[in-house]
Image (cartoon, rainbow, N blue to C red):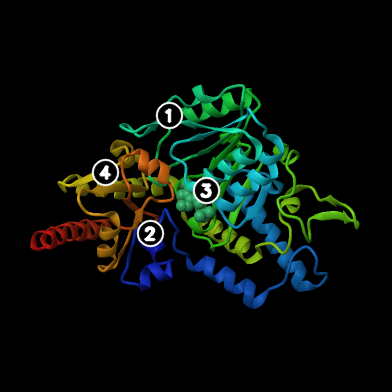
Amino acid sequence: MNQPTLRKDFPLINRLPLVYLDNAATAHKPQAMIDALQHFYADSYGTVHRGLYALGEQATSSYEQARATVAQFINAATEEIIFTKGTTESINLVAAAWALYHLKAGDEILLTEVEHHANLLPWQWVAEQTGAQLVFIPLDGKNYVLQNPAAYVSSKTKLVAVTLSSNVLGPVWAAGDLAVLTQRAHEVGAVVLFDAAQVVSHAPIDVRSLKADFVVFSGHKLFGPTGSGVLYASRSVQGAMHPYQRGGSMVYEAWFDHAIWQDGPQKFEAGTPLIAEAIGLAASVAYLQKNIDWDLLHKHEAALCRELIKGLKTMPRVTIVGNRERLATEGHLVSFVVQGIHAHDIAGMLSNKGIAVRAGHLCAQPLVRALGHESLVRVSVALYNTTAEIELFLRELENTIALFNQLVEQS
Ligand code: PMP
């Protein structure tokens, strides 16, 4: 992995005088992915699974090849990959197509206190609909680690739906805890869903070793197009799922009064699917497979986090929100607050200097509130970010704080 060379592959990152540090929200695109979209629309456009003509057959073959590429990327079988428009839709699909049919009053859905709204609100809805209860694995807010997760699994637990890495805090699982939680969940017959949105562009995912029933992630965070996402659903759990939407391309037979669903991913991909998006996602996966050494990437991103933490620690009114030691060795993001200055003001002032960071409750409002904050600033890195960018960010943050202090003194 040659990081400076890779950076050149991302046209917008190179073109703008921009320091882009909001990769946990969405990542920029390599030319290879943009070329794949251009090629599909300009040279080989057609719809899938129906056209008995060359363009239709070509599109079907590219779409199904995309499924195979993504499957291989996460060590799944091809028919275990369902294309969605993102993590949010993948989780809502599981809620509507599996949970609504299997949960009832008295059952428990086990979540953590660090979930993104995408892995919280669908389960609130399922709880309302079925009478099931939400149970939360608590966060130790001092060490930023989820406490004794397996202890929260009981005979009532029917679903464990947890994030692999927090979009606010980064790493939150103590070593080995996730495997014990999964094992315990399966022992009581519960189904396990992992939200991999914050992992997939930073570390390899292996659904077999995770032993999950469902794994979800978004393509746009993986250098792919918006509107692309993945739901891995194991063969065994697919048998217990009902269609999510009903329409074209998902039946063996339809009659005036009933229909017989196809098996496999088609059952969950009603209508004309996200063809270009899947092809683009597969191109970004292929780009990563060709160019990325995950160990080197991990070291590169952790080194950037170390620089960040080192700089932030010297700033008197800055408090890092997250486990500094872990972020410095395995992080890809750092969240913080500046006492007396709202996170939105920090982000707005940095934006005037061409620096993009995220500010707010980060779509994890219950967590941010529980940690005693209303709003955080989050800096998140990807493979193309450099030490020089982190240094520039730190300088501009210091200037921003100084300027703000001056303004307050003058007023
Ligand atoms: N889960 C996590 C942990 C996330 O970080 C995000 C995106 N910030 C989501 C879910 C939702 O992803 P999307 O908006 O792409 O559906």
Tags 3 and 4 touching, CB below 8 Å: no
Work out which residue is located at the far left of the displayed protein and give it. Answer: 410
| Residue drawn at 56 percent across, 41 percent down | 124
Q: Within 10 angstroms of label 2, few (less than 14), some, or many (20 or more) residues?
A: many
Q: Which disc number belongs to residue 48?
A: none
Estimate the spatial distance between the alpha carbons at disc 1 and disc 4, rounded to whole Å: 22 Å
Where residue 118 is drawn, which disc sits there? 3
Q: Are marks 3 and 2 in contact (CB under 8 Å)?
A: no
- Name the mark nearer the viewer: 3 or 4: 3
Q: Give the structural element (helix, strand or loop) at label 1.
A: loop
Image coordinates for residue 326, horizontal then vertical, percent:
33, 37
Compared to residue 192, the image places residue 331 above or below, namely below
Residue indicated by mark 1: 175
Quarter where residue 273 is shown: bottom right
Q: Earlier in the sequence, mark 1 or mark 2?
A: 1
Residue at x 54% of width, y 56% of height: 219
Cα separation between marks 4 and 2: 23 Å
| Whole-number angstrom distance, CA of label 3 to CA of label 2 | 27 Å
Residue 170 in sight in this render: no
- N-terminal of the pair, mark 3 or mark 4, is 3
Quarter of the image where one finds residue 62: bottom right
Which of labels 3 and 2 is toward the front? Answer: 3
**Residue 75 found in image quarter:** top right
Compared across the picture, whether 197 is left or right of 373 comes to right
Q: Measured from the top left, where is residue 329 in percent x and y?
A: 33, 40
